[in-house]
Image (cartoon, rainbow, N blue to C red):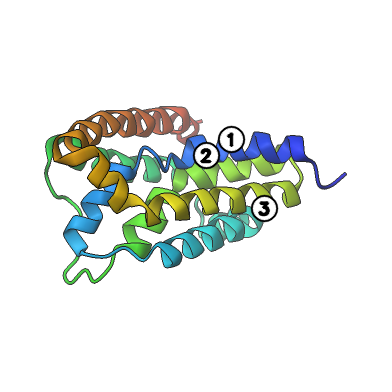
Amino acid sequence: MGFDWKEILTISMVLFAVIDIVGTIPIIVNLRTKVGHIESEKASLVSGIIMITFLFVGEEILKFMGVDVKSFAVAGSFILFFLALEMILGITLYKDEEPGTASIVPLAFPLIAGAGTMTTLLSLRAQYQSINIVIAILINIIIVYTVLKSSSKIEKALGKNGLGVIRKVFGVILLAIAVKLFAGNVKGLFV
C-alpha cells in the first residue's frame, strides 16, 4: 500500500474544504489593505511546512505540552470566531504593533494551517497513507499560492461593494465553521 490517486483526490478535496482558501479571499484582501503586502511564497511555504510537520509529530507535540486534540480544536474555533466577527462587524480585534507583512500570522497560521486543518490531518492520518496525505497537502498549497498571488486581481474583479458583500457572507460561513468546530470538540473536554 502506498501511492493511490483515489486517496490523493479524496484527501485533497477534504483539505480544500477545510482550508477554504476561496472563502478567505475577503480576509486576505483585508489583511493586504492593513499591512500593505502579503508574501504569497512565504505564507504558502510556512503553511505547508506546518501541515506536514503536524501530520507526523502533531499529536506527540500536543501530548508533550499536555494538550489534547479536542482542546486544540476548541482553541482554534475561538480564533476563527474572532476573525469571523471582524469580517461581519467590520471591527479590528487582531492588532500587530508594526505589521510589515501578514504572511505568517494570521495568514499561514491560523487561517491556512489552523486548528481545523490540523485536526483534520490527524483524522486523515488514521485512515490514509501518509504519502498520499503529503501529496494532497502539496496540491492544496499550490492552490493556496495561486489564490494568494492573484488576490489583487480578484479584488479588482469584485470591486469594493462585491468584496464587502462577500466578506460578510464568508464571515457568517466562517462563524458557522467556528461554531461547528467548537461544538464537535467541546463535549470531549468534559468526558
CB atoms of marks 1 and 3 within 8 Å: no
Q: Amino acid at mark 3?
A: Val
Residue 113 visible: no
Q: Residue at x 42, y 33 (%)?
A: 181
Q: Amino acid at mark 2?
A: Phe
List the residue tagged with mark 1: 13
Q: Position of residue 20 (x, y in %)?
A: 43, 39
Q: Judging from the image, what secondary structure is the residue with disc 2 in?
A: helix
Q: Position of residue 16 (x, y in %)?
A: 52, 39
Q: Quote the CA–CA distance across marks 1 and 3.
A: 13 Å
Q: Nearer the viewer, residue 147 or 111?
A: 147
Q: Nearer the viewer, residue 6 or 134?
A: 6
Residue 50 visible: yes
Q: Earlier in the sequence, mark 1 or mark 3?
A: 1
Q: Judging from the image, what secondary structure is the residue with disc 1 in?
A: helix
List the residue tagged with mark 2: 16
Q: Which mark is residue 112?
A: none
List the residue tagged with mark 3: 134
